[in-house]
Amino acid sequence: MDLQADLIAYYEVEAAGGLRVEHARAMRFELRSAFAEVLVDGGVRSVLDVGAGPGLDTELWQADGFEVVGLDLAHGNAGQMRQRGLRAVTGSLFELPFRSQAFDALWTMSTFVHVPHDRFDEAMHELLRVVGPGAPLGIGTWGGRDFEGVVEFGELRPYRFFSLASHDRWREMLARHATVEEFRTFEATTADGWEYQFAVVRAPG
């Protein structure tokens, strides 16, 4: 099974149909706004939005005056972003198509939910490679319990692989690579019982 190929296939279908449904947008809007204040206070200019989907957050970063690039696995999502005047690139978080220390900050929401635990360190190394020393990263993902596997739900195919970690485990995983400055959890709001985890971490300086 090629997990990344299946993800690309799924999100290309989703993008083609304009089917993206944003969960907990009020929560996500609050988190992004608070993180934007951190960036403004730190004099940040450039932001990389990893796993941007059709660019709903990317658009907000641009409206706030940041130099932002949205990156997504699906060509369809990158195309939607470009149509709305956003800078967008197709690519994987395991091989980011940017030079080292290209960005002042990074934002990624609900992307790590598709990263297997045995590739987590690889992914974090790559994210940290493209930001400067001491850069802030806003990282959100689903979790609350330990689980990995393909979940068969929804009408789109192929089914996707998901990777979740308990709150304590996820915080420890992040702390292996960066300083955890903020860590918040949110109770489940859907029948699957998945909770949300959001962290602000600081790249080694």
Image: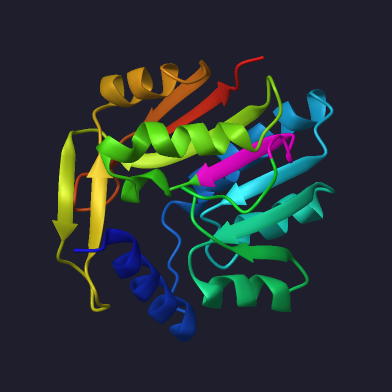
Q: Is residue 102 magenta?
A: yes
| Position in image of residue 164 (x %, y %) | 25, 40
Residue 122 in magenta? no
Residue at far bottom of view: 17
Q: How is the image coloured?
A: rainbow
Q: Nearer the viewer, residue 148 or 110?
A: 148
Residue at 59 percent of width and 58 percent of height: 71
Q: How many marks?
A: 0
Is 122 left, or right, of 38 in this rendering?
left
Residues 169 and 35: in front is: 169
Residue 196 showing in the rendered view: no
- 34 vs 24: above or below: above
Residue 53 spot, x, y in % from top left? 52, 63
Residue 63 falls in which quadrant of the image? Answer: bottom right
Above or below 93: residue 75? below
- Residue at 24% x, 56% y is 161
Q: Which residues are magenta?
A: 100-108
Q: Is residue 131 above or below residue 154?
A: above
Q: Residue at x 52, y 38 (%)?
A: 126
State left or right for residue 58 relative to residue 110: right
Residue 54 in sight: yes
In the figure, residue 193 lies in which quadrant?
A: top left
